[in-house]
Image (cartoon, rainbow, N blue to C red):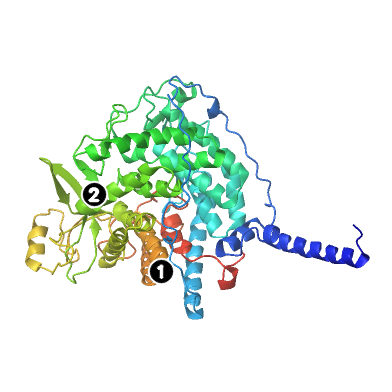
């Protein structure tokens, strides 16, 4: 076919235009220029200043020979095309932001980011590559096998904050950690999974840095060694020397249920990324056991605090809680349904059965002087076959508001979302009630007979508080104890506020989060970072502090990841709205 010079010119111009658009779409902006797209572009718009190289650990955990091979291989389930109704989105559809609101938001953003950087600077200068910083003395400590827990847990925070130089330096350091050596002869499976494996994979998912995935695989193989047991159930603590030698490990006779029940998300995600289903398969067998026992416990729908992996018993026992020891087992259920995109029905069924049981037995309305329409999480003890509510609320249990809210969207249950809002507001109320603006570790209140109507009864409160030896005259009205008056920088309450703002779009949650952040920042600040407070029920400043920072779920000056960055995460970074490059 004959092509004229003019036609050739037109074709050349068309090709150049197409190439220009391709460059813009796939090279300059690999994703549409959303807030996340801008952040990814900024963090990846040039090669790292230092070459980030994976340094293999001194021991190759993938080469461990098992004394007890897992009996059957389990494949990753095929995701459903639509695990929830297509119109049912998790996040609220936000309207364009007005200039005045943007100004307030950016000012808050900068303060949060500044506090994080102060904490990170202290860790970098005083405790680099140690598990944690001591915020009062400026020393350091090893707590989780000596693999730089704060650094690994901080990786995704550094990314979200847009701290590129700090991120690259931390990634380089993380990729040199030696998982073949431990400061402890016994390695905690649960802690290693949630802190280290979770931290590495979160950073990899955000950044795509291949060296992080290589380190995560090393760690996944180490955790996989915890399943080298006669029945394929994991040990709570890995005997490091025995595991290296491939010797059979023996599951403990009694562990808190969250320990084996909180391996599924990280191990599943590692299988999804690598294509190796062995990690998912190992954790899935544990969850199959929980699934089989869910409706055979003394409180059907929930599992007792203590279980036995040795005996494969997850049904015996009458003590139940939403707090420490069980919290993350429950938290992971709707998230696993989401991660697998509905590909395994058991997670939807387990989440629904648990949430129904929790709403029925654990959740209560506390009696307050102002008749607040709120809920709080409690504990349950089954006595003579009957569930008895213990109206003690742990700060750890404040995660349930976010869990109910997320499940409400995922499972299309408006009643879950309604409960999630009231539970979140319950923990916000507890923060607001104390003179320091911070919620104690453990509190007790008087449960109402009905959720819909609960007038204040002074005589009832007086009667209930007199039954509590822990009651003190200075406690706010409505509270019968502050059994543990400390505030140890836990993130759960503000995490739920983050969920509620993103799900509902209610701007009141922004101000609630800001009030919480301000109180925490002012009350916990030290010369070096932020520290746990011994008593938040009395406002005598400076508040008495502990030389301690709770390493909780995410680390980087532990509280700063979730207590600070939950506020940060709900303020999406954008250069157009004040996001700084430096």
Secondary structure under the numbered disc 1 in the rendered image: loop
Q: In the rendered image, which quarter contains the N terminus?
A: bottom right
What is the number of callouts on the image? 2
Residue 238: name its quadrant.
top left
Q: Residue at x 32, y 30 (%)?
A: 309
Residue designated by label 2? 357
Question: Within 10 angstroms of label 1, few (less than 14), some, or many (20 or more) residues?
Answer: some
- Residue sticking out furthest to the front: 1
The residue lying toward the viewer, choosing from 532 and 578, is 578
Q: Residue at x 54, y 51 (%)?
A: 124
Residue 17, can we see it? Answer: yes
Percent x, y for residue 101?
Answer: 47, 77
The residue lying toward the viewer, choosing from 521 and 138, is 521
The residue lying toward the viewer, choosing from 576 and 281, is 281
Percent x, y for residue 145?
Answer: 45, 36
Q: In the rendered image, which quarter contains the C terminus?
A: bottom right
Percent x, y for residue 207?
Answer: 59, 51
Residue 97, label in figure: none
N-terminal-most mark, 1 or 2:
2
Percent x, y for residue 338?
Answer: 43, 50
Residue 505, label in figure: 1
Q: Is residue 153 above or below residue 536?
A: above
Q: Is residue 23 above or below residue 107?
A: above
Asked if residue 11 lies left or right of residue 71, the reply is right
């Amino acid at each position: 076919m004959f092509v004229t010079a003019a036609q050739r010119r037109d074709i050349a111009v068309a090709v150049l235009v197409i190439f220009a658009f391709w460059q813009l779409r796939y090279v300059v902006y690999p994703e549409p220029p959303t807030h996340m797209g801008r952040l990814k572009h900024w963090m990846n718009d040039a090669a790292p200043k230092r070459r980030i190289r994976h340094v293999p650990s001194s021991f190759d955990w993938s080469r461990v020979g098992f004394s007890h091979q897992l009996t059957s291989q389990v494949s990753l389930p095929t995701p459903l095309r639509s695990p929830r109704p297509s119109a049912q989105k998790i996040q609220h559809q936000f309207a364009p932001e007005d200039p005045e609101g943007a100004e307030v938001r950016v000012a808050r953003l900068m303060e949060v980011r500044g506090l994080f950087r102060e904490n990170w600077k202290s860790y970098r200068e005083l405790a680099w590559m140690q598990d944690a910083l001591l915020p009062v003395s400026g020393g350091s400590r090893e707590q989780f096998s000596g693999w730089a827990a704060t650094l690994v847990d901080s990786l995704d925070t550094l990314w979200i904050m847009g701290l590129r130089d700090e991120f690259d330096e931390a990634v380089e350091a993380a990729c040199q950690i030696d998982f073949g050596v431990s400061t402890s002869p016994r390695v905690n499976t649960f802690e290693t999974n949630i802190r280290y494996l979770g931290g590495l994979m979160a950073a990899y998912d955000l950044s795509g840095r291949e060296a992080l995935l290589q380190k995560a695989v090393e760690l996944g193989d180490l955790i996989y060694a915890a399943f080298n047991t006669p029945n394929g159930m994991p040990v709570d603590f890995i005997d490091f020397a025995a595991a290296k030698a491939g010797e059979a490990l023996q599951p403990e006779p009694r562990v808190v249920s969250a320990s084996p029940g909180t391996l599924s998300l990280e191990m599943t995600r590692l299988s999804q990324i690598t294509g190796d289903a062995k990690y998912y398969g190992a954790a899935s067998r544990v969850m199959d056991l929980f699934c089989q026992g869910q409706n055979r416990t003394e409180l059907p729908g929930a599992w007792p605090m203590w279980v036995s992996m040795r005996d494969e018993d997850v049904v015996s026992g009458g003590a139940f809680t939403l707090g420490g020891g069980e919290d993350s087992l429950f938290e992971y259920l709707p998230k696993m349904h989401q991660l697998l995109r509905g590909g395994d029905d058991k997670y939807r069924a387990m989440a629904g059965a648990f949430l129904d049981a929790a709403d029925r037995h654990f959740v209560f309305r506390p009696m307050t002087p102002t008749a607040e329409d709120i809920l709080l999480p409690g504990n349950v003890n089954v006595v003579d076959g009957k569930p008895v509510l213990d109206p003690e609320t742990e700060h750890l249990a404040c995660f349930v508001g976010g869990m109910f809210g997320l499940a409400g969207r995922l499972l299309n249950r408006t009643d879950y979302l309604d409960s999630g809002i009231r539970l979140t507001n319950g923990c916000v109320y507890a923060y607001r009630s104390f003179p320091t603006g911070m919620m104690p570790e453990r509190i007790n209140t008087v449960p109402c007979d009905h959720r819909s109507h609960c007038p204040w009864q002074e005589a009832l409160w007086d009667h209930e508080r007199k039954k509590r030896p822990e009651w003190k005259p200075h406690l706010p009205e409505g509270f019968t104890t502050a059994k543990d008056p400390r505030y140890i920088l836990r993130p759960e309450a503000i995490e739920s506020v983050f969920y509620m703002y993103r799900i509902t779009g209610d701007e009141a949650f922004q101000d609630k989060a800001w009030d919480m952040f301000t109180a925490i920042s002012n009350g916990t600040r030290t010369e070096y970072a932020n520290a746990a407070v011994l008593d938040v029920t009395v406002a005598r400043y400076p508040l008495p502090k502990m030389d301690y920072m709770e390493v909780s779920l995410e680390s980087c000056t532990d509280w700063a990841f979730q207590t600070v960055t939950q506020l940060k995460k709900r303020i999406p970074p954008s250069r157009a709205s004040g996001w700084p490059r430096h």
